Image (cartoon, rainbow, N blue to C red):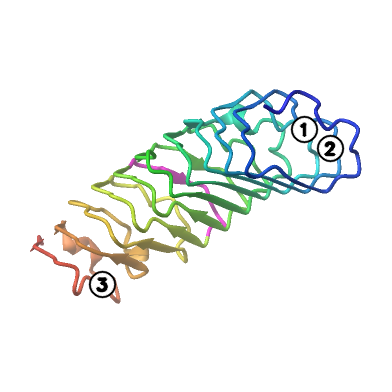
């Protein structure tokens, strides 16, 4: 357990590594007072509870990494207090089951989000990733995602890369990618989607594997390259 104000007298600390302990609970204001901390790694701990505003009082922290944790939901209270300055968040090989749509509200400095190898993460809801003006990379690789709802990605004007590989996607709803910038690269291989609807400006940058059905090809009449070779395509509808 990391108690409230555990490090309050360590004002000069810049890097804090708490990996491979037996931390199960991180209390509210656990790290309060680490005003110069830049990097916080809490890997390979069985964390089941992150209390509201556990990371408050870290005005200079840029990077938070959590690995092998057991908490189920990532929400706004999980990262309370880091909104204005956090640049990098990574939660991987954990028991993450849900990312609440309000989790990243007001994260104006966030550059990279890595939520990977979470075996119980199955859905990305509408508006989960929105209004992140500096976000460049969104890595959702190797989860168990089977559904991406409409407008899951919205107002991400500087986003350049999304990795959705090695998931179990079966439903990519219409408008899932419609609000993304035109020059983005999206990786979608290793999935079993039965229907997908994408903007023409995006299609030429997508790798779509094991496609069962691609509906309404007429909408892609301006597409320069459509690569669906060698992906066990069963049916194409015009």
Say which element carries label 3: loop
Reading the image, the residue beneath label 1 is 31
* Left or right of 1 in this view: 95: left
Residue 165 rendering spot, x and y as whole percentages: 36, 58
Residue 28 rendering spot, x and y as whole percentages: 70, 23
Is disc 2 surrounded by few (<14), some (14 to 19) or many (20+) residues within 10 Å?
Answer: many
Say which element carries label 2: loop
- Given residues 228 and 113, the one toward you in this image is 113
* Res 53 quadrant in image: top right
* Res 44 quadrant in image: top right
Q: What is the distance, in whole Å, between disc 2 and disc 1 at their CAs? A: 6 Å
On screen, 160 above or below 94? Answer: below
- Determine the main secondary structure of the stretch shown in magenta: loop
Question: Which labelled disc corresponds to residue 34?
Answer: 2
Query: What is the quadrant of the N terminus in the image?
Result: top right
Residues at marks 2 and 1 touching, judged by CB atoms closer than 8 Å: yes
Query: What is the quadrant of the C terminus in the image?
Result: bottom left
Say which element carries label 1: loop
Question: Which labelled disc corresponds to residue 96?
Answer: none
Residue 36 rendering spot, x and y as whole percentages: 86, 44
Q: Is residue 134 magenta?
A: no
Magenta-highlighted residues: 148-159
Residue at the image point whose x is 58% and y is 46% from the top: 132
Q: What is the distance, in whole Å, between disc 1 and disc 3 at their CAs? A: 50 Å
Reading the image, the residue beneath label 3 is 226
Is disc 1 surrounded by few (<14), some (14 to 19) or many (20+) residues within 10 Å?
Answer: many
- Given residues 214 and 97, the one toward you in this image is 97
On screen, 54 above or below 213? Answer: above
On screen, 54 above or below 165? Answer: above
If you read the primary sequence from the N terminus, does the residue marked by circle 1 or circle 3 appear first? Answer: 1
* Left or right of 130 in this view: 172: left
């Amino acid at each position: 357990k990391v108690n409230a104000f555990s490090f309050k007298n360590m004002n000069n600390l810049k890097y804090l590594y708490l990996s491979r302990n037996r931390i199960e609970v991180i209390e509210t204001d656990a790290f309060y007072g680490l005003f110069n901390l830049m990097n916080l790694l809490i890997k390979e701990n069985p964390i089941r509870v992150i209390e509201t505003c556990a990371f408050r009082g870290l005005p200079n922290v840029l990077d938070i990494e959590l690995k092998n944790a057991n908490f189920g939901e990532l929400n706004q209270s999980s990262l309370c207090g880091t909104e204005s300055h956090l640049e990098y968040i990574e939660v991987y090989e954990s028991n993450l089951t849900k990312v609440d749509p309000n989790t990243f509200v007001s994260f104006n400095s966030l550059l990279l989000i890595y939520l990977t190898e979470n075996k119980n993460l199955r859905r990305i809801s509408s508006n989960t990733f929105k209004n992140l003006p500096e976000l460049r990379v969104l890595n959702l690789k190797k989860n168990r995602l089977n559904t991406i709802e409409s407008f899951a990605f919205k107002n991400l004007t500087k986003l350049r890369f999304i990795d959705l590989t090695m998931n179990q996607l079966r439903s990519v709803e219409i408008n899932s990618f419609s609000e993304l910038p035109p020059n983005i690269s999206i990786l979608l291989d290793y999935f079993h989607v039965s229907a997908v609807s994408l903007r023409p400006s995006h299609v030429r940058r997508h790798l779509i594997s094991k496609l069962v059905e691609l509906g309404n090809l007429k909408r892609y009449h301006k597409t320069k390259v459509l690569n669906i070779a060698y992906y066990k395509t069963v049916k194409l509808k015009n």
